[in-house]
Image: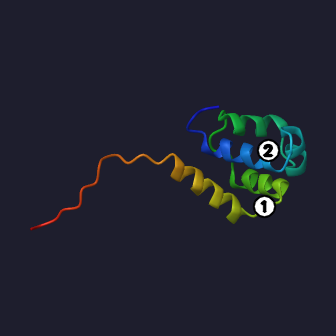
Amino acid sequence: MNKDNILGKVIKTLRKEKGLTQKELSELACIGYDNLRKIETGRVNNPSFFVIMMICVGLKISMNQFCYKMSQENLKNFKPIYNYQPYVTA
């Protein structure tokens, strides 16, 4: 898995939390098994909104829950570009 593949990592984590295999989730979400596998491994980087929505349906979570999980994962990987030093006058 590509280390920057946050989307795939989140989907895989949620799928495992629900105790589902890739095959089971792909059937519940009505998407192709290969498509789900490629998303999880980072070979598809930009799936459509509809595919993400269907994955959420298969996981029985809301888009809000999914977006929250994505934001939490993004914060874990956040690296500032520079060390911010506020400008202070004496």
Mark carried by residue 39: none
Q: Residue furthest left?
A: 90
Name the residue located 28 percent from the left edge and 54 percent from the top edge. 84
Q: Residues within 10 Å of mark 2 (few under 14, many from 20)?
A: few
Residue at mark 1? 61
Q: Nearer the viewer, residue 43 or 59?
A: 59
Task: Indicate the amino acid at tag 2.
Answer: Lys
x and y, in percent, of residue 22 in the image: 83, 39
Task: Indicate the amino acid at tag 1.
Answer: Ile
x and y, in percent, of residue 42 in the image: 65, 35
Tell me the element at label 1. Answer: loop
Name the residue located 29 percent from the left edge and 49 percent from the top edge. 83
Mark 2 or mark 1: name the one nearer the start of the chain: 2
Q: CA distance from mark 2 to mark 1?
A: 14 Å
Residue at mark 2? 16
The color scheme shown is rainbow
Q: Residues within 10 Å of mark 1 (few under 14, many from 20)?
A: few
